[in-house]
Image: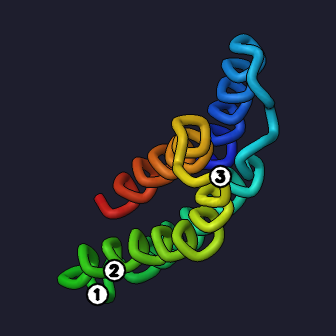
Amino acid sequence: MTLIIVLSIVFGIHIFVLHQLGLPLFDNLIVASYLVNCSLALAIYLSLFLLKNKMSEQIGFLYMGGSFIKFLFFFLFFYPHYKLDGGLDSLEFAAFFVPYAISLIFETLGVM
């Protein structure tokens, strides 16, 4: 629940900053990015939480596996869209990696 609240607040701030800068608010798959990162982070966190005691010696590998899955989603679903114009600009980067970073922090705290 905390992740959903935090990502919602960050999303609001992200949209507000885009608005203040006069930039398009919902371009670059920003909504999909927040939803995918939130969903994957919740699934990874839940998996880590459930397996923490049972597989405590492998928890770091499970955590890295979760990060691999998130990067796989990025390269399969987001990156091709971002590369359509020939490159990955800063708005596209921020649209994916802001929620990715917030989710990563949440997952990291789940490992502890």
- Residue under label 3, please give it: 85
Viewer-side residue, 89 vs 9: 89
Label 2 to label 3, Cα distance in Å?
Answer: 35 Å
Please state which of the two labelled residues, at mark 3 or mark 1, is closer to the viewer.
3
Label 3 to label 1, Cα distance in Å?
Answer: 44 Å
Question: In the image, which disc is placed on residue 62?
Answer: 2
- Tell me the quarter of the image containing the C terminus: bottom left
* For residue 21, side relative to residue 73 (left or right): right
The three-letter amino acid code for the residue at tag 2 is Leu
Residue at the limit of the structure toward the left, as seen here:
57
**In percent of the image, x 37 and y 79: which residue is there?**
65
The three-letter amino acid code for the residue at tag 1 is Met
- Residue under label 1, please give it: 55
SS at badge 3: helix
* For residue 14, side relative to residue 75 (left or right): right
Q: How many marks?
A: 3
Please state which of the two labelled residues, at mark 2 or mark 3, is closer to the viewer.
3
Q: In which quarter of the image is residue 73?
A: bottom right
Residue 44 image position (x, y, % from top left): 50, 72
Residue 99 image position (x, y, % from top left): 56, 46
Viewer-side residue, 51 vs 27: 27
**In percent of the image, x 34 and y 72: which residue is there?**
63
Label 2 near label 1: C-beta < 8 Å? yes
Does 62 sit above or below residue 18? below
